[in-house]
Image (cartoon, rainbow, N blue to C red):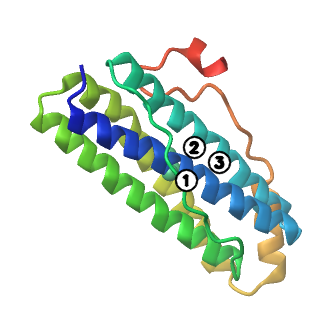
Amino acid sequence: MLSKKMEAQLNDQLNFELYSSYLYLSMSADFKAKAFNGFGNWMQVQAQEELVHVMGYHYHILSRGGKPVMKKIDAPETSWDSPLSAFSEALKHEMIVTSRINALVKLAVEESDFASSNFLQWYVSEQVEEEANASEIVNQLKMVGDSKQGVFMLDRELSARTFSMSLIPGGMPAATQGA
Ligand code: OFO
């Protein structure tokens, strides 16, 4: 059984992950509208992964006797000056997500909620990857700078990213994913 405090904070994070998806969908739309289809594809896949993260919280809250509550989601920006500014914002956003997850783990430990602590470990590892991925692209964009050819090549490279349902948040059965 979740404590009321843990249930509330897991719910906040569920809704924050929905915002993540919303933000990346908006970035995807902006990129695609500007013919950066590879960057747009990367962001679209990111948005899909965020929904899987949402479902992990949804499953965990329900499994522990709580109730997921969908809240109002803030509207993200709709336009970014450059690929670098969008990916820099994505990296900054992921760093915020990491600190929120760390705070959840801290609460789980304080409450001796070992099931939530165990569940959250999946997100701790995932955040290492999330930050590394965004950071790598930010660095590459900085490296190519104003080179149109460099940006074009990077855009093409990121068009190869695909969404995989094999990504399963901790404790969430695979069958729930496909449902
Ligand atoms: Fe869910 O990891 Fe990004 O936000």
Determine the secondary structure under disc 1. helix
- Residue highlighted by disc 1: 20
* 4 sits to left or right of 28: left
Q: In the image, residue 17 lies at what x, y percent?
A: 50, 47
Determine the secondary structure under disc 3. helix
* 139 sits to left or right of 48: left
Query: Spatial distance from mark 3 to mark 2, Cα to Cα?
Result: 5 Å
Q: In the image, residue 111 lies at what x, y percent?
A: 12, 33
Residues at circles 3 and 1 in contact by the CB criterion of under 8 Å: yes
Determine the residue located farthest toward the bottom in the rendered image: 146
Based on the displayed image, in which of its 4 quarters is residue 143 positioned?
A: bottom right
What's under tag 1, amino acid-wise? Answer: Ser
The residue at label 1 has a CB less than 8 Å from ligand 1: yes
Query: Spatial distance from mark 1 to mark 2, Cα to Cα?
Result: 6 Å
Give the mark, 3 or 1, whose residue is nearer the N terminus. 1
The residue at label 2 has a CB less than 8 Å from ligand 1: yes
- Residue highlighted by disc 3: 47
- Residue highlighted by disc 2: 50
* 96 sits to left or right of 90: left
Q: In the image, residue 159 lies at what x, y percent?
A: 80, 53
Relative to 133, say whether 168 is above or below.
above
Determine the secondary structure under disc 2. helix
Q: In the image, residue 66 lies at what x, y percent?
A: 34, 24
What's under tag 2, amino acid-wise? Answer: Glu
Relative to 2, say whether 15 is above or below.
below
**Residue at 70% from the left image edge and 74% from the top image edge:** 83
Label 1 Cα crowd, 10 Å radius (few <14 / some 14-19 / many 20+): many
Residues at circles 3 and 2 in contact by the CB criterion of under 8 Å: yes
What's under tag 3, amino acid-wise? Answer: Ala
Query: What's the mark number on residue 175?
Result: none
Relative to 98, say whether 142 is above or below.
below
Q: Quadrant of the C terminus?
A: top right
